[in-house]
Image (cartoon, rainbow, N blue to C red):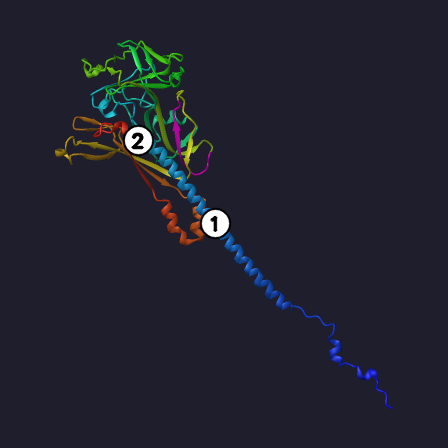
Amino acid sequence: MKVKNIYTTCKLPINRMMNVNKQHGFTLIEFMVAAILGLIVLLAIGGAYVSTQRVNEVATSRVARQQELRMANNFLIRDARMAGSFGCANIFALSGGAGVSVDQGSNKLNKNSDASYFDINDATGVNRVFAAQILPTTSGVVTAIFNGKFTAKTGTDIVVFNYGINTQPLLTVTNTGVNNLSDLTLSDVSTFTGANADARVVLASCNRLDILQKSQLAVNASTKKISISGLTIPMNKTGVAPSTAPSVAEHYAVQATLSNLQTIAYAVGNISNDSSPAGLYRFELLSDGSWSAPQLLAKNINTVSARFIYVTGCAVAASSAGTEKYKLGTGAFITEGTAVVPPTGIELTLTPSKTDLDLKVESSASNNVSTNTADLTPIILNATMRGANVCANR
């Protein structure tokens, strides 16, 4: 009987035995290819992220710029529309000689040095009240406004508006006359308290306007009454048309109001020790007679230019329609024939300036240049100056 060799029967091929524990992996070339592909993907993701961030920065910057310009627009339009408003007094009527305006202050305001002023001390412009002024950066008025805290950019206009705020009607007038105005009752006298010699208030009616200093008012907070003494301010209690000539026109008590004189100035430039690009700033004459610190309205504003709009030849009837004429200029008044005409409106042009982000976008993405250029287009604002409207007489 033949016995089989189990070793011979169970023997495996030598090559199969050698492959039992063999491991497979990436070659160096395969690893390098995978790494390069991964790096390309990461770079693509990183580039997309950076691009998205830049687009977001540009969008945010433009939205912020538009919001700033919108806020500046709102302030400018509001102040322009209020310019020349002192109760029912009309700057055009006062300028044309139909009424009287008098600076009753012990320290007279000067149109060449005071930003808040009436031009009634100028022999060539008697009885004229400035509703607004367009001034160069070299004007002496600028020194009073900026007070060393601000530097205006050369070549831009400075725009100043005057009007009354906290306007209150006289509720009662128990004593009338020329030199003894007493018991002028108001609903709130607190806004007229204080004795700062530079703070001004305005007593106005449709035919007359007087400017006073707060220190010239005797205010009784408990009775809510104000007295004015020692000043030539005629008051007609009944409101009947005065018999005196317009040169000494009376106030109509039923029309009279008392208000604080508000003056607002706009200028492009920088606050002291600020090297950033110029911006549009707003300055406000406070109730105590001092000027506020510069208020930044919009950054990156290159220039502001202003022109007044004048209307002459007012159409008083349907038959005279088409006789009105419109002119542009920068003077506080113009003369049309024998008529003295104050501005009826104002046109303001704001020119934005480029930012560092704008320049980066233009240099790295040419497709954004046209859009960016549109963002820098000058913005033109037009506003009617309510207190000096000639034809509407409002």
Q: Residue at x 67, y 68 (%)?
A: 25
How far separated are the C-alphas under marks 2 and 1? 40 Å
User: Mark 1 Cα within 10 Å, few/some/many (few <14, many 20+)?
Assistant: some
Location of residue 179 in the rendering, given as x and y in whole percent from the top left corner: 28, 9
Q: Amino acid at mark 2?
A: Arg
Classify 271 as above or below 123.
below
Q: Which residues are magenta?
A: 274-286
Say whether disc 2 or disc 1 marks the residue closer to the N-terminus.
1
Residue under label 1: 54
**Which is closer to the viewer, label 2 or label 1?**
2
Secondary structure type for disc 1: helix
Q: Is residue 276 magenta?
A: yes
Location of residue 304 in the rendering, given as x and y in whole percent from the top left corner: 34, 36
Location of residue 352 in the rendering, given as x and y in whole percent from the top left corner: 38, 41
Classify 179 as above or below 310.
above
User: Mark 2 Cα within 10 Å, few/some/many (few <14, many 20+)?
Assistant: many
Left or right: 207 in relation to 349? left
**Residue nearest the viewer, comparing 353 with 92:** 92
Of the 4 image quadrants, the one containing the N terminus is: bottom right
Tell me whether circle 2 and circle 1 mark residues in contact (CB < 8 Å).
Answer: no
Residue under label 2: 81
| Residue, far left | 319
**Residue nearest the viewer, comparing 60 with 167:** 167
